[in-house]
Image (cartoon, grey):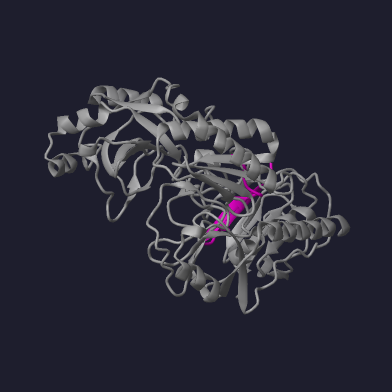
Amino acid sequence: MNYLQVHRAGIASSVQDSGRTGALHMGIPPSGAMDRCALLSGQHQLGHQQDEAAIEMAYADFVASPTETCRIVVTGAPVYVSIDQDEAQSGQTLTVGAGQTVTIKATAEGVYSYLHVSGGIITPPALNSRSTSPREGIGGLNGSYLQDGDTLPLGSNQAEADLGDPMLHVPAPAEILWLRFVAGFQYDEFADAAIKQLLAEEFTVTAKANRMGVTLSGEKLQSGLTTLLSEATCFGAIQVPPDGHPIILLNDRQTVGGYPKPGAVIASDCLRLAQCRPGQRVRFAICSPDEADRINWLEQHYLETRLREVV
Amino acid sequence: MQFEVGPAGESAMRLAYAESPHPALTRGLLAIQQEAERRFNGALTDAVVGYTTLTLFFSPASLERDRVESWLREQAEGISSLGSDLHEHEEPAVVLPVFYHHSVAPDLEWLADNKGLSIDDVITAHSQTTYFAYATGFAPGFCYLGSLPDELATPRLATPRARVPAGTVAIADSQTAVYPCDSPGGWRLIGACPKALFNLSDVPPSVLSVGMGVRFEPINEADFRSMAQGAS
C-alpha cells in the first residue's frame, strides 16, 4: 500500500473532501473543503470521480513524501511548490517518485491550498465523508489536524487521467469584497440602526478567521437583541454576538447557536471570504433568495461546463 | 400559537414559534420534521429542531424554496390546532446513572454552599426531576435538557474551562446536560455519568435525542468505577 509521510504539517492542515450532509441534527457540522472549486479542480485533474479526499492546508507550510511513485496536483490559494530541490507548478499534474519530497509554501495571497494525490487520501470515512471535523474529533486522521510525522494511507493509482487545469480559481478579491446575504432569522427584530450600519459601513476581515468562521471588525453593531434560545445555524449565517463584531459562520460552525442573526451570506461569497487574508475590506448587500439561486445556477453551470470541456 | 416561516440563508427554511419552549411544542416540531423527511425524501439534506424552531435544509436546485415554505406554513398551522393532543404521548424517560461526588464534579460543593443546601439536597433536587431534551448541538450528542428545579438554577462560569471530561454532568441557567465528549465548557459541573453517550459506530450514534425524557439516578463510587470500565 502507498502512504504519504508528513514531515511538516503546518498550522492547520487536515484531510477534507466535499463534506458530510445529514449530520447537523446530531450536532456535527458539514466540514469539507473551504474552497470547493479548488477541491473539484484537483479531483478533476487526477481523474478522481468519487469525491476523493485531499489535504487542505491554511497558510501552507507543508512537507511530505510518498512511499511509492504517485501523481499529485496542488490547487487553491497560490503557493510555491517544489519536488526535492526542483521548482514545480501548482495547478499541474506532477509525478513524485517514491521517497521524493514535496514542499508546499504559502505565497502572500489567499489562505487555503490543497494537495491532491492520485487515488486520494483514504483515511476511514465517518458518516459518509472523510472530512475532518477537528472540534468534534470526527473524520480525517483520528479526527485531528495533521501533525508532523503522520502517515496517511493513499488509494491505488487506478485513475490514469491527466487532465488540464479547469481554471476554477477563486480570483483574488478586489479592494472591497461584497458579501451578498439573504435576509432572515432575526432580520425584522434587529434595531433599524444596526441594519442601516450593516448595509452602509465597511468591515475588515480580522485574524480571528478559521474553518469555523470569519470574525469581522468595524463599527460595533448593536442589534438591540439579547441572546436567544438555541436554534439551527446555517452556512454563511451572520452571527452578531454582544461585542457587536459579526462572525460569518463557515464549514466547521457549531450547528446551533443563540446569537442574533440578520441573515446569511450566499455560498458563492463565503467561498471568496474564506480565501481572504486579515485586513481585507468587505461590505454587505442584501440579495433575494431568487437572486442567490440565479448566482448559484450560473456558477454551477460554469463549473460543470469547465469540468466537461477541459480534458 | 404564533409562528413565522422564512429563509435561513439560500439553502434552508426556518419555522419559528413566538412561544416559550415547551415539550408539546417540541413534539409538534418533531412531528413536522418526520413528516418533512417523508414528504421531501432525499431532497431534504437535514432538519434541525431548536428550542422553538425547526430548520429544513435542502438544495434549491432539487427542491423549490416556495414549495417548502408553503408546505411548512401549512404544517405549522396544523400543529397549532393540535394543541393539547401533543401533551399526551409521553415516552418513558431514559435513565442515566450519575456519580455525584467532588472528585468528579468540581462545582458540586460550591453549588451546595451557594444555594444554602446540603450536597444531598442538591443530588435529590437534580435526580428527582424528569427532564426533556429540547435541542442538540454544541458538540455531537450534546442535548440541552430542561428544566432544572429553580433552587438549582445557576449562571454559567464567566470563563469557560479549557477541558471538561466526557461524561461530566453539568448545569447552567435552568438547563442541565451531559458532556458526551471531552470539550471546553462553561457550565457548572456536578457529577459524572459512566455511560458512553455518543459513539459513531452505534446506530443511532447518540443515546439522547430531541424529544426524549431523561432522568438521573445517583450511583455510588464502586458502581461508577465498574460501569465506567465496562463502557470504555
Q: Which residues are magenta?
A: A1-22
Name of the residue lying farthest toward the top: B92
- Residue at image location 81% in from the left, 55% down from the top: A304
Q: Quadrant of residue A6?
A: bottom right
Q: Is residue A82 left or right of residue A253?
A: right
Q: Quadrant of residue B217?
A: top left
Question: Is residue A19 within the magenta segment?
Answer: yes
Q: Is residue A251 left or right of residue B95?
A: right
Q: Nearer the viewer, residue B152 or A300?
A: B152
Residue A94 visible here: no
- Residue at image location 50% in from the left, 29% down from the top: B82
Q: Is residue A280 above or below residue B188?
A: below
Q: Is residue A252 above or below residue B55?
A: below
Q: Is residue A128 above or below residue B186?
A: above
- Residue at image location 23% in from the left, 24% down from the top: B220
Q: Position of residue B138 (x, y in %)?
A: 44, 45
Q: Position of residue B202 (x, y in %)?
A: 52, 28
Name of the residue lying farthest toward the bottom: A175
Q: Is residue A197 left or right of residue B113?
A: right
Image quarter in which the C terminus of chain B is found:
top left
Residue A47 visible here: yes
Q: Position of residue B104 (x, y in %)?
A: 25, 37
Q: Nearer the viewer, residue B141 or B25?
A: B25
Question: Is residue A136 within the magenta segment?
Answer: no
Report the number of numbered marks. Answer: 0
Q: Position of residue B100 (x, y in %)?
A: 23, 31
